[in-house]
Amino acid sequence: MADVTVRMRVNGGPRSASVPPRLTLADFLRERCGLTGTHLGCEHGVCGACTVLLDGQAVRACLVLAVQADGAEITTVEGIASPDGELSRVQQAFRDHHGLQCGFCTPGFVVSVTAFLRDNPDPTDEQIRDGLSGNLCRCTGYQGILKAVRAAAGPSAGAAAPEETG
Amino acid sequence: MTGAAAAAARYAGTRVPRVEDPRLLTGHGTYVDDVTRPGMLHACFVRSPLARARILGVDAAEALAADGVHAVFTAADLNPDVREQWYTLIGKDVPDTPRPPLAEGEVRFVGDPVAMVVATDRYVAEDAAELVAVDYEPLPPVVDYAAAGESAELVHDGYPGNVAGEFPGAPFEDVEPVFAEAPVVVRRTIRQQACSQVPIETRGIVAEWSAPSGELTIWAATQSPHEVRLFCSRLLGLPEQRVRVVMRDTGGGFGQKVIPQREDMCVMLAARKVPGPLKWIEDRRENLQSAGMARHAHGDVRIALDDGGAILAAAIDYVEDVGAYPVPWPVGTSAAVGMFFPGPYRVPKAAWATASVFSNTSGRTAYRGPWQFESLARELLLDSAARKMGLDPAELRRRNLLRRDELPYTNPCGVPYDGITPLETFEQALKMLDYEAFRREQELARAEGRYIGVGTCTYVEPTSAAMALHATEGATIRIEPSGKVNVYVSGGSSGNSIETTVVQLTADALGVDIADVSTVQGDTAVTPFGGGAAGSRSGSMTAGAVAETASVLRERIVAIAAHRLEADPGDIELDGGRARVRGVPESGVTLAEIANAAYFQPETLPPDVPAGLEASGRYRPEHPLIYANATHLCTCEVDVVTGAVKLLRYIVSEDCGPMINPNVVEGQIAGGVVQGIGNALCEHLAYDAEGNPVATTFMDYLLPTAAEIPDIEYGHVETPSPGPGGYKGVGEGGAIGAPPAVANAVADALAPFGAEITSLPLTPETIVALVRGADGTVTR
């Protein structure tokens, strides 16, 4: 099949490229945009390492084709911290509570939690566990991650997160 | 920061924020798949769809004709180029098992690499792999290792009975009289299912050959860059200094990435035959099919006790599945199962033997506490014995756990324990739970038809084994001309927080602010040789290396400062980035001033002090092993209708000596515990009767999620080891203690049904069968 031109905004900036229709959004971001923070852990939509925000909604970039994201607003883990490197509230909470070890699953957790707390600023423990159950971590036993989400939750939790626009 | 403020700072022992985090939290880590090189090509393997078959032919014509395909390599292309193939970790002189890069003549498991396609991108390479036609003649596979001894078929010629190796250990005859006469004997066959390490980052490697300079550069997902370099230099016959291995970030390993495997060999061998850098990134299906299996084993185990519950003897006859191509040679490691079977208990006599058996399945690989079957078998047996004797399992353990006043104690298999606290950790864990209260609650719950249970596991663990590849560890510290510090160790971040650990230790050793210390790791071109992250060794060994090296620099700094301050070197102290005369806080020179002198005013240095402020040192432990110990305690509720297990509380009381960073210690424990919980309840790298793997996605290989995991509570007992700083290893223990603690908790919950747990995993189906008594192992 012939390549297709896609245009989207990635972390606030315009991106356009001519891509094969079968190119996944994850590979588009990693290989065409050089945004290698979006990691691939299973490529079948279970581990959640490749989670990005598509029009504000957390999606698995391995299960979305780049052509499906045409016209969309994408936020990857690289777009979560301030441009000067200051960590977001969620990122800082992960650091404060040992919420990461090897760091490979971390971008997916950071993005998922950012969206989760925007939509559920004051979650119960059960809601937190449920909200995290779509992301796999093999290093931390989830202990530091749970603590981080509890710490990042609260009335102003969602303040800095991109709004759902889709 | 002022000198006075820094004087209060001591970094070891505190929860210092990790230096790895800012890059990893923002998506700026450098994992192997993030490495892109100009002209880079991509590899994809053609893998066997059959458990065992003869390869009659490989036709790559159609694949080679495809646009973007550079090459299709088969065994005939790559295997003859192997010069030497052995691991520094195990040594050259073991009777190693076969390990061809690509399958030659016969495929021996589903996923066995048969050919490697090289193309311009991964999509094209995968398409072309589909076009490679392999003609197979199916052969009957040996799927069940437990029956492999009787099979008429052989996984490998030259291994009668499919036995890869045996360790005779301590003879059973010696304990038979004790078992014959003991008032109480409990004997079970315990079975553990196949599991996999499952790092969330799969395996991967990039190899770039520079023909003009004769240099090979490798980027790898590895726990040991220097082992990759040594292995590669031998494999290709390249001088070691012409191979450079780089690893900034590795996405978890847990043993799977301690040494290069067959696919890595293929990429190394092909690197000189392709026109650009060659990258291979494994996908998850390949990882679950081919990256290795662990845990699969059974043991005929028994203990003899007297009427008072004192253990008289223990015996284990252990048989493990090593698959078709174990990595590394598994037979030596299996001995630890026998030697540690007595655990931290007073066991007067013991016997053991191990056997490693081939099957047509994925090869056995190292996994966090590879010998942990000893703890699973022993702790299940102890609970069975307690039930049989009508004793509380805690009481039975109290009567047998080693006390401090009995140390040093050599177990009946010859293991000389010292510096351990099994009884203390056991009592601490029970106290944290309020064990008596739990038993009362259990009684009330049972009266209401609810089934709750408590299980424990107490183990002693060898850490920081100083042998072969792991015999020493090096560090280089450079105090730069500005007075800032860089510390170089082998390391590389693979989830063990070794960057933070090294920075903490160096800041303490030199008396400088932690913000003034950086670390450079994971590049063999610039770091001293080191064995890598394995065997719960990084903390202790790296602490030794930093201490050794920093002491040289301290001495030099003190000499320069004493000279400048006209003081006695014995009166100089280093603190807050300054050297000053003890008791005279306003005195002193900064490290920046000392460095300036050392590099730019060498004429001002005292005689006999060399110019510059850099040093390298190498730590060689006096003790071949450092013992750590812990008790795991778990409570659960079992739904006897659905078979669901809900974990209620999980307590770990461990003794890893003083903690360098409690966050790191607890993180290692928690990660191991949750892997162990997964091993106990849901993970299963299963095969069907024809040898087809049936768990090759995360829909089938079930990992625990945040929804199933209880909060883990930690108790610390700190007994110093004889090693540097008194530190002990803590990387593997979590995964050792959890499976038996969980299994015992479930067995305790189901005790009213007379259920005996002898095999894992404890899936809902298994539990319902236990409750219904349908399982053959149920006794009443």
Image (tube, rainbow, N blue to C red):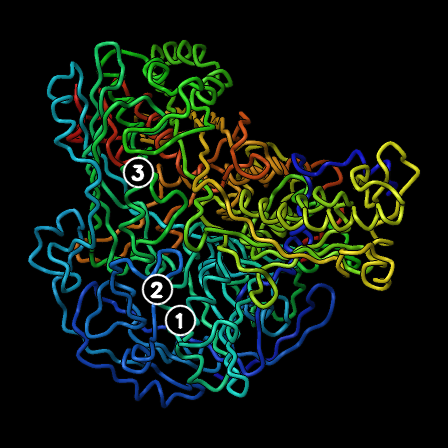
Q: Nearer the viewer, residue B147 or B124?
A: B147
Q: Tell me the tag on residue B100.
A: none
In 3D space, how far apart are the residues under numbered discs 3 and 2 (Cα atoms)?
27 Å
Left or right relative to B320: residue B490: right
Q: Amino acid at mark 3?
A: Phe
Marks 3 and 1, how far apart at CA: 34 Å
Circles 3 and 2 in contact, beta carbons < 8 Å: no
Q: Which residue is mark 1?
A: B234
| Image depth: mark 3 or mark 1 in front | 1
Q: Position of residue B201 (x, y in %)?
A: 49, 58
Task: Confirm or deny contact between disc 3 and disc 1 (CB under 8 A).
Answer: no
Query: Quadrant location of the N terminus of chain B?
Result: top right
- Tag 3 subunit: B
- Give me the residue at 25% from left, 11% from top: B390
Tell me the element at label 1. Answer: helix
Name the residue at 25% across, 16% down: B387
Name the spot of residue B285 as percent of width and height, x first: 37, 61
Residues flagged by tags 3 and 2 on a common chain: yes
Element class at badge 2: loop
Query: What is the crowding at mark 3: few (fewer than 14 residues within 10 Å), some, or many (at least 20)?
Result: many
**Mark 3 element type:** helix
Question: Do labels 1 and 2 touch, CB within 8 Å?
Answer: yes
Residue A15 vs residue B38: left or right? right
Q: Quadrant of residue A92?
A: top right
Mark 2 highlights which residue? B86
Labels in figure, total? 3
Q: Amino acid at mark 2?
A: Trp
